[in-house]
Image (cartoon, rainbow, N blue to C red):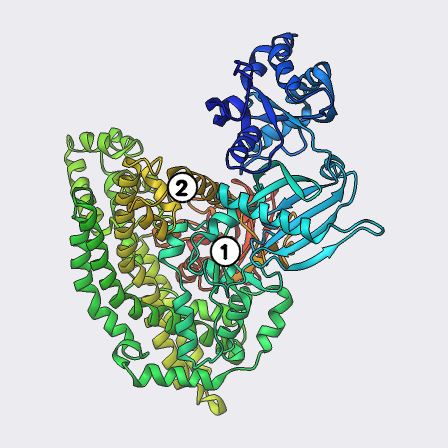
Amino acid sequence: MAHAPYLTTPWHPSSTDEGVVGGKARSLVAMKRLGFDVPDFCVVTCRAFDDLAGRGGLDALRGPLSDFLAARGPEVAYAVRSSARGEDSAENSFAGLYSTFLDVHGPDAVLGAIEACWTSYNNPEARDYRETRGAAASAMAVIVQALVPAEWSGVSFAANPVSLALSETVINASPGLGEALVSGAITPEEIVLDAESGEVLRRKNPPGSQQLPDGLLRAVLAKTRALSEAFGFPQDVEWASVGEQVFLLQSRPITTIADVYYSRCIEPWKDDPNARPDDEGRLWSRAYADEIWTPPVSPLFYNIHNLTSSITSYMGWHGDPTPLPPDVFKYYRAAAYVDVDVLRRQYSYHPKFSRLAGILNFFPESLQAAVRNDPWRWAGRLRRTARFELAHRSLRSLRHNHAALAAMWPGFIKQSDGWFDVDLDALSLEQVKEHRTELNKVVSVVSPACGFAVAYHAHDLTFILTGLLEKWFGDGDALYAQATSGLDQSVTVAESEGLWRLAKLLRSTPPQVRAAARTGFDGFERLAKAASEGRIFLEVFDTFWKAHRHRGASYKDVIHPRWGDDKGQLLSLIAGFVDSDVLSPRALNEEMAELRRRTQRELLARCRGPALWRRPILKWLFRYNEIYMSERDNHRFYFDRVWYQLRRIYRTFGRRLAEDGVLEGPDDVFFLGAGEVELGLSGALDSAAVKARVQTRRRAWERTLRSQPPKFLAGYASHDCRASSDAEVLVGIGASPGRVTGPVRVVYDVRELSNVADGEILVTRQTDPAWSTVFARIGGLVLETGGVLAHGASLCREFDLPCVTAIDDATSLLRDGDLVTVDGRSGRVSVDRAKLVLEIGPLGSERGRRTC
């Protein structure tokens, strides 16, 4: 049959164009050309829909369609089904929304079925689906295909579409034609097989029905595998059999599996046969990983900051003989999850009294009592302590580690300043890779020292000191907060002080200069240079920017821009604070330092009589807790230089990949795994495949930015995710004591901080050092993720602000302007839309007396 504008066949060049034949037909064409058994078909093109649908123009199809039907004889029946643009894609299946007609005979009946398919394009269900999925209206092609007189028919899935298990293949089968099965009119036999071996794992057959013969089962499995391999993605396949021959009627990507499938590509363990991420008997926690990677996590950062080796080292230091699974962590919905059993083993090396809410929050409620009561593996803890204090003690020991870091930082600052001055785009690809190698050598020295300080000493001291204060005096969380507030030599306080002073300088500039500060740096700079006060500001600003250009990210993930990427980002932050009248961060810190000293004196004074032996223990703990909590905060100022330089390196890789046509834009590089970036640079990545991965991962990242994924998983299903809140009271973890009432300000990005007003309650996913300047202004903090060691919780204790963490979906449940009471002791946030006046803060400070 000759090609006509309104009708085409699988062998015509136009039939591979989705714009001509739609998504479903394009897949059929590909299957036919690859040699799969696909019944003969032709396609009524999208152009026919555009020109003829609703216009009574079916006669324009009659001639070419009759030629196609006549060539196959009058006895052949046909299936007529839709093939709209965008249908059967990895994002949108449109399953069951458009009409399908079976057992259609003769030109008149086929033409009538085509017209009915066109009509279904605009049915209410299809319109709603397009609107819900953000799919634009387009056009519909229609497939006319010889009907297979099926003895068996069914649907097979190369991966489990319900559990999202890539390790399972699911086959549904029933005798006869498959339309009743697809429409849900009958219950099919369901067979779940191991995708690799083909072993039947589970089989459910309706009572009294036939069982799919083993030969056909193996044939369907083989064809499903072959199709998925050919298309490079797990397929949802409709099939029908006559005798021993299996015909393929349709194949489309499994829409539910895209995130899991493309996430699997970046896993370090993806090729390890011992990995079992799909196992529904395994539990996974996002809460612990949120302390390390704040979701949404870019695929690239998940790779370059993967902590599997750190967990392995942790177990090794404690002499734990039990092998770890290869998949300690897994990536799903732009978040990192850790194996709960591994986490439980890790915290069994903590004394029972130190397993407080901040640790228990990492586990499902159903396990928390068991975790709290697990026997303390004191011998392993003693072994680790001995190894730290006796071997390489200058780097590892509690007494010496902080001094080693202090000696390391000056040289590191000088070296990293040199990194930032390098024009990476001017280097060859090999030179950029050599530079990355040199950076990694530096990291291999700095990172272990930071790890001992933060992951061991600071972490352990926090929970041990809090646990002892609770045991000896009661109310350990509140006492710990007061005994740790206002730490000396805080780099964060110094940085916040610098920003505060810049805001005061900006206030002294002419009004037109101040106004320009919110519109971008270049225009502001031109105006500022024309005024003496402006020139003074620019001089101080540039000095501060150069020393802090590696800062300013919403979170440490390399996907987030820094001040070094855009001076305007820093300038707008300063401009937003010009009208604030709060005390300087340094003055506030000194107030809190006096509270810390007073609290410690009072607690030590209470250690008398039979309890006198507690005094030297407390003095020792107070001293080292101050050292390492300062180190925990300060190390980020230094180590953020690594993240900033890695961001610069990968952005230049992204620009090169975009120039080569592999990526659509340079920042798409953050949605590739580290290994994929290397493959792309070597020319081994197909641009079409990369585009699909980037689109799926970006969509998951953007979704997670506004809506949290499950806190716990069993396999990939939500587990133990009970609603922790009602409409008026949200319940989380009390992370910094105190009680304050104020209006809500929801912030997703550090660049929005200029919108925060004095006294507002900041509600966000998590904070990072770049958020620190706002702590002098807010009345309290509510976080969706993290526990008592969250960055924001630590700063709230220093600034004497109430803080509640671990309130799932707080940024969705609370809205700008809601009046809430934050109780950082009980972990409750009460919504009171009728109340208009803020309560006095817990210490009666000026910040507690703010009004709306």
SS at badge 1: loop
Whether residue 832 sits left or right of residue 206 in the image: it is left
Q: Quadrant of the N terminus?
A: top right
Q: Which residue is mark 1?
A: 785
Residue 690, which numbered label? Answer: 2
Q: Which of pointers 1 and 2 indicates the residue nearer the eye?
A: 2
Question: What is the residue that sits farthest to the right in this orientation?
Answer: 208
Question: Left of 581 or right of it: where is 834?
Answer: right
Q: Residue furthest bottom?
A: 610
Determine the residue positioned at 34% across, 41% down: 667
Residue 584, image x and y in percent? 31, 53
In the image, 1 versus 8, the foreground residue is: 1
| Residue type beneath disc 1 | Thr
How many residues crowd mark 2 within 10 Å: few (<14), some (14–19), many (20+)?
A: many
| Contact? badges 1 and 2 (CB < 8 Å) | no
Amino acid under disc 2? Val
Residue 142 on image: x %, y %? 61, 22
- The residues bearing labels 1 and 2 have C-alpha atoms spaced at a distance of 31 Å
Q: Position of residue 424 (x, y in %)?
A: 19, 45
